[in-house]
Image (cartoon, coloured by chain):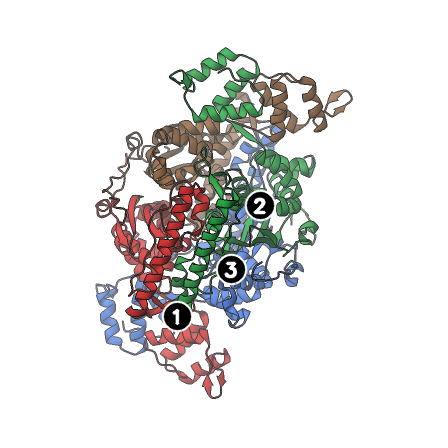
Chain colours: A brown, B blue, C green, D red
Amino acid sequence: MKDEKKFEKLEPIRVKALDDILGVPFKILDDGFVRVVDYLGSDQSIVQAARVSYGKGTKQVSQDRGLIRYLLRHSHTTPFEMCEIKLHIRIPMDAWRQWIRHRTANVNEYSTRYSLAIESAQTTSSKQWRIQSTDNKQGSSGFFDTKLGKEMTADEKFLHDKSREIYNKRVEQGVAREQARKDLPLSTYTEAYWKIDLHNLLHFLELRMEKNAQLEIREYANTIGREIVKRWVPTAWEAFEEYALNSKEFSGFELELLSLLANKKMEDAKKKADKYGWLKYKDGELKFNMERWEFENKMNDLKIELPW
Amino acid sequence: MKDEKKFEKLEPIRVKALDDILGVPFKILDDGFVRVVDYLGSDQSIVQAARVSYGKGTKQVSQDRGLIRYLLRHSHTTPFEMCEIKLHIRIPMDAWRQWIRHRTANVNEYSTRYSLAIESAQTTSSKQWRIQSTDNKQGSSGFFDTKLGKEMTADEKFLHDKSREIYNKRVEQGVAREQARKDLPLSTYTEAYWKIDLHNLLHFLELRMEKNAQLEIREYANTIGREIVKRWVPTAWEAFEEYALNSKEFSGFELELLSLLANKKMEDAKKKADKYGWLKYKDGELKFNMERWEFENKMNDLKIELPW
Amino acid sequence: MKDEKKFEKLEPIRVKALDDILGVPFKILDDGFVRVVDYLGSDQSIVQAARVSYGKGTKQVSQDRGLIRYLLRHSHTTPFEMCEIKLHIRIPMDAWRQWIRHRTANVNEYSTRYSLAIESAQTTSSKQWRIQSTDNKQGSSGFFDTKLGKEMTADEKFLHDKSREIYNKRVEQGVAREQARKDLPLSTYTEAYWKIDLHNLLHFLELRMEKNAQLEIREYANTIGREIVKRWVPTAWEAFEEYALNSKEFSGFELELLSLLANKKMEDAKKKADKYGWLKYKDGELKFNMERWEFENKMNDLKIELPW
Amino acid sequence: MKDEKKFEKLEPIRVKALDDILGVPFKILDDGFVRVVDYLGSDQSIVQAARVSYGKGTKQVSQDRGLIRYLLRHSHTTPFEMCEIKLHIRIPMDAWRQWIRHRTANVNEYSTRYSLAIESAQTTSSKQWRIQSTDNKQGSSGFFDTKLGKEMTADEKFLHDKSREIYNKRVEQGVAREQARKDLPLSTYTEAYWKIDLHNLLHFLELRMEKNAQLEIREYANTIGREIVKRWVPTAWEAFEEYALNSKEFSGFELELLSLLANKKMEDAKKKADKYGWLKYKDGELKFNMERWEFENKMNDLKIELPW
């Protein structure tokens, strides 16, 4: 090359903490798992990629940790795409239906057209039946007592047995596998290889570790995050916890209010909130307003008093 | 602009044949449908986009039809991405599981975490039970007789009733919807808005109209292709039929053999095939070889004789 | 359908404010523009798509505006993908190089292999030469005085003329256009059709309207946002301004500090910041720390005092 | 697990032939290169992923080579996505402009906003000036004689020197780097990390190794294919050469004609071609028809005679 830059032969980048668990399944739910099949890159690769962008100009950029945190904080996402991981997952089809909505991954799933369906469906113990949440239309909150739970578990077992029996009968009679499977329960386990880059994996985890995500997929996400990603790219993981998992966003209007409240200008804050339509009353009662309610929760967490 | 080019105000591009059926459902399977919600572009938009690429240089390019055919034939796919369509689909979850593997689309699916599951599952009449294909491990071939079919349909009904009953019971008892649904059959209907560009839609159709695609999804693909895309972009559709649906690919080696066979050099062809490992015998019988078998099928379609 | 749902024929969704400017170019820089070629969807389509997800359960969900704001605030991005827009852009290749890094769009660009390069390059008036920023390594800050600027503009003109002269000479001598263009300046204008869904467009705008984005691309982004998107989907745009353009994120650690500061626990805050490594001194001077500096800026905007 | 399947600890999959050249640059053009930074997977990973899909049903599937060839031939592309490679590339911006149009890759490019532009532009020796092709509007064909070439090379050098001189002057005077670079020639070198999965890489290579691709990018594609991919996944590469590089597609209509011609039904073939509009005459001369011309070329390669 004209600029005399010499490139040395490289060694593949390996992360010992991850190599130590390569292929080892982490158990999830009653019969699921996730295991690392292979990966490419490390914390060091994020830095390496960022430095290509910054060229010679980066000598003074502090340490790698500072750089990784800076990149993550400011949504400079491309260096995180330079790491890739391949997982082997066993998961109920119902949770997999949500999982697969993340489109930026490579997937090979077990085919029940080609092979017999996996002989396992997610079971629920008598203590695990969840009560419909009232304030979150798509969530659950608390568990049924064991007595009622036992009954439900018995119903579940009946349905699993019956649907499997009919599936087996169909297959024995020679029904095409692609049709025989049609009435298997959504809880039937499937398996897949799933390969994704670190940026998109973190995005997946941010959505699926969130407390409103469905419990089943949350358990997979938590395991992937805390058992796998943390071993793989510890610095990026630490930054992700700080800047994604534990962070909060304030809208333009919320920032205005926050500024007033932090400076104890309670009346001004109240007027502003009123002008914004947050303080409508009905029969002397403050009407529910979701944007106000979300703000109240944030202020509560910050231990900042509200003027209404 | 310096080059004095003047742009005139545009009218939105509309296709009457498609506007005529906007919102009208095409029925599929026992309780599914597909309907066009909206779209962007037409045959004319493909040409318009291609002409941006070719700039002033295209004045002499023949007619629009020739250009569209040229683009499709030579995999110049980007002008086809300039058309977009949005469909509303009602489909069994089992077929939707395959559908959703196509990642290059936008999707909003009915949420059974948020709302009660759609009260319908795909049913199979006594004449529709399919026999497992023997030469295609993932396909079906032919139907069972009605007597056996009736029995299977009865089992299906039992399972649908039972699983719905248990689902309803769970919901009534207050089980979280996200958990109550777990044992619904895969045949349960779901609904979705699905938006995709024409290039990726044609790719989807090529894979899913194919005779080896599962019958259920094939029926959707056929309807989308022949009832919707054909009305929307008739010229592109005609080219797609010619160059994708009805075309065949020959490998480098197949081309060599084809040349010999078309010139009646039977012995040379045989030697070549042998050298390539296609003509292994066992006990005097030609052993099965999949690459040779596929070639034989192509020659058969072309009515070209084989020397072995 | 079993559930007797009737679908009515639909009319295409049109937005008058956008139809009024369809095809009309907004001028940008000295010779660039952006114009809307066509689009699909509106604010109403976002709501329509969200309601598919929520099914029958949404009847009570407040108004459309509240829903759109909720979706945008909580990163429920898929309904925004249900809107699509196609733009025709004329832009210097240098800015286009950045633009094209956004991968989630469809593109047809003018081909200088096929046609003669557009005879125009971005020129800089004597008042527009920008000074390298000192605190932002990749930005500019302020302008040169006109005297120096005139000299620079003369140099620019010389280079534009010379490179065009050599380009023309090559073409006349019969050099392949694909090679003749090789030494055209990066400032040469190109044109493209660019089609993208609303979610990805908003993401593009968030990054490119940002004050650190390069001035050239920022001018395109501002025009697209304030002249086009605002007309197209006014409710989504208003929410985007509130929740994306004007919002700020606080990390887990920043939230802890903010809580202490808002409650005037200055000593505790200081201790915490120190423990976190933010308060290192050298020769009696607080050393620069980027994370602390960013926090200071946020507190400054909120008019919250700092204890160090 | 219920099915007693035991998973053993895995070792990362490494390919010695590729490890041997890790980091070593292959020189391309006058000052470009491509080098492998890291990778994930091998031929074996393709098989491994396919076997997940096929489940237990695959024991009888022949050998790995047969499976890989089958997958590639039938566009079962997902197992190829399970391999990933990261390259470091140095390339003229003009060729990079084409490269980056492939959207399914991860990219970190050298930033000339942040750092000084790389001090190198692609030079053309007196023997390398290419003549515009007459039958391919976007290609070249043959070279100019050295005398004319020398002149052109001198012009090129003048322009490179002048544009670099003005760039340096701007930078010295303190012009923002993001603006100073605006008139650098398209031939200026840039560098990037580029990471892509094997399926998308093969698609890139199919388009860019093609004889109509621009010479510059073709040289990169050839090196990546023949020096890198071939070492990395030799079985997939062999299949790719056979089924992609050396294959030909025949449209539905072409297959009909081919069948007639191979069976020497010359008159029938002629009638059919006429009916299809391929045999229009003007002043006794067969008029040019691109679809017929492409078919003629294919028949010529197959040494099959034509009846017109």
Displayed quadrant of residue C305: top right
Quadrant location, the N terminus of chain B = bottom right
Q: Secondary structure at mark 2?
A: helix
Any mark on residue D293, and which? none
Q: Which residue is mark 3?
A: B79
Q: Residue at x 29, y 69 (%)?
A: D147
Mark 3, other Cα within 10 Å: few <14 / some 14–19 / many ≥20: many
**Left or right: residue D146 compared with residue C154:** left
Q: Is residue B125 visible?
A: yes
Helix, strand or loop at label 1? It is loop
- In the picture of the structure, the residue carrying the numbered disc 1 is C174
Chain name for mark 1: C
Q: Is residue A179 visible?
A: no
Q: What's the chain of the residue with tag 2?
A: C
Q: Amino acid at mark 1?
A: Gly
What is the x, y in percent for residue C140?
A: 48, 39
Pointer 2: what residue? Answer: C198
Give whichever of A229, C192 is nearer the camera: C192
What amino acid is found at the position of numbered circle 2 in the picture?
Answer: Leu
As measured in the structure, the alpha-carbon distance from the residue carrying label 3 to the one carrying label 1 is 29 Å
Q: Do discs 1 and 2 belong to a common subunit?
A: yes
The one nearer the camera, B256 or B132, is B256
- In the image, is D227 to the left or to the right of A96? left
Q: Is residue C24 above or below residue B250?
A: above
